[in-house]
Image (spheres, rainbow, N blue to C red):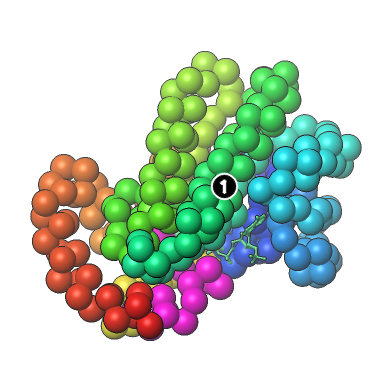
């Protein structure tokens, strides 16, 4: 799909990947409605962009705020050509230490609220006869990772949803693209994740690189993209030979554990 001239609604716009993506998309000529938490940082981002953009602060977990955002998209963008979901929260903790409320919140923010928003945006896309929904997943949405259990599960769900909806909408002109970055240097990763990443020699991409790869996936009409090697290879291996990945992660878990518990 063409980015230039398209109307794009970006959820999670002031995150590390979201803000880098906003810059890339705006530089390529898109008109953007930027949504996320943090009114001031969203405004600063809008002012830094080379093309038409507006922002709206929303907590995606709140139904009334999602509805207000859809209304704003109608008045500002007119039609949503591309809807990008780059919201997310993450915990790097032993499963037993994640508070029950946080488990619910993680699914709400990473999975349920974006799905509900997509459902409300779909009638408009159907009426216009075209649209693209881009869900930012994760390598951990294909490889269940120790100490990221709830985050992994929320991204597995988002990947499954994206695949099912793509198949359901196959002849409607509406497409779904699922992009799975590997670890990326953004605020979602706290200092314990960063330290664990160093100890396990985890590859970490800059968000600007990830944003360029997402834009390329959009322009090339990709359905599912896994970013980075060898992570994208391991995502495939995990489907075919999961016991092999069990063994590799058994060793890695020992290095990870003190960081997850610290
Ligand atoms: N960084 C990585 O290693 C990595 C790897 C693979 C996939 N991803 C995925 O990439 C996407 C973007 O993450 P990121 O790396 O850019 O992290 P990030 O910088 O933390 O961005 C996530 C954004 O989501 C926002 N958000 C959280 N809760 C929200 C809510 N209730 N309503 C609205 N917005 C909310 C955050 O706002 P606040 O900052 O104000 O909380 C933040 O702007 C996420 O889906 C993440 O899972 C990240």
The x, y position of residue 186, in whole percent, is 53, 71
Dividing the image into 4 quarters, which one contains the N terminus?
A: top right
Magenta residues: mostly which secondary structure? Answer: loop
x and y, in percent, of residue 106 in the image: 52, 54
Q: Which residue is drawn at 63% across and 64% down?
A: 15
Q: Is residue 110 visible?
A: no
User: Splitting the image into 4 quarters, where does residue 196 fall?
Assistant: bottom left
What residue is rendered at 66% in x and 27% in y? 122
* Left or right relative to 25: residue 77: right
**SS label for mark 1:** helix
Residue 202: percent from the left, percent from the top? 31, 73
Residue in the image at 77% along x and 69% along y = 41
Q: Quadrant of the C terminus?
A: bottom left
How many numbered discs sit on the rendered protein? Answer: 1
Magenta stretch contains residue 232: no
Query: Observer-nearest residue: 12 or 207?
Result: 12
Q: Name the residue under label 1.
A: 108
User: Range of the magenta residues?
Assistant: 181-196
Is the residue indicated by label 1 positioned so its CB lies within 8 Å of ligand 1? yes
Relative to the observer, which residue lies in front, 39 or 129?
Answer: 39
């Amino acid at each position: 799909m063409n980015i230039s001239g398209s109307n794009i609604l970006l959820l999670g716009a002031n995150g590390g990947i979201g803000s880098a993506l906003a810059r890339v998309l705006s530089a390529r000529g898109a008109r953007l409605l930027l949504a996320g938490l943090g009114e001031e940082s969203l405004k600063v981002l809008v002012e830094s962009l080379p093309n038409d953009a507006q922002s709206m602060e929303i907590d995606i977990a709140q139904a009334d705020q999602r509805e207000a955002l859809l209304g704003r998209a109608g008045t500002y963008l007119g039609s949503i050509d591309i809807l990008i979901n780059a919201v997310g929260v993450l915990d790097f903790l032993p499963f037993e230490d994640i508070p029950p409320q946080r488990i619910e919140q993680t699914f709400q923010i990473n999975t349920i609220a974006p799905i509900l928003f997509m459902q409300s945006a779909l009638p408009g896309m159907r009426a216009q006869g075209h649209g693209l929904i881009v869900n930012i997943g994760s390598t951990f949405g294909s490889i269940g990772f120790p100490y990221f259990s709830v985050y992994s599960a929320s991204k597995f769900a988002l990947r499954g949803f994206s695949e099912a909806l793509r198949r359901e909408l196959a002849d409607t002109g509406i497409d779904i693209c699922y992009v799975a970055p590997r670890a990326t240097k953004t605020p979602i990763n706290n200092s314990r994740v960063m330290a664990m990443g160093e100890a396990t020699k985890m590859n970490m991409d800059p968000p600007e690189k990830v944003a360029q790869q997402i834009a390329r996936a959009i322009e090339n009409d990709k359905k599912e993209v896994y970013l980075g090697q060898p992570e994208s290879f391991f995502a495939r291996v995990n489907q075919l030979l999961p016991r092999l990945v069990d063994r590799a992660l058994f060793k890695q878990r020992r290095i990870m554990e003190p960081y997850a518990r610290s």
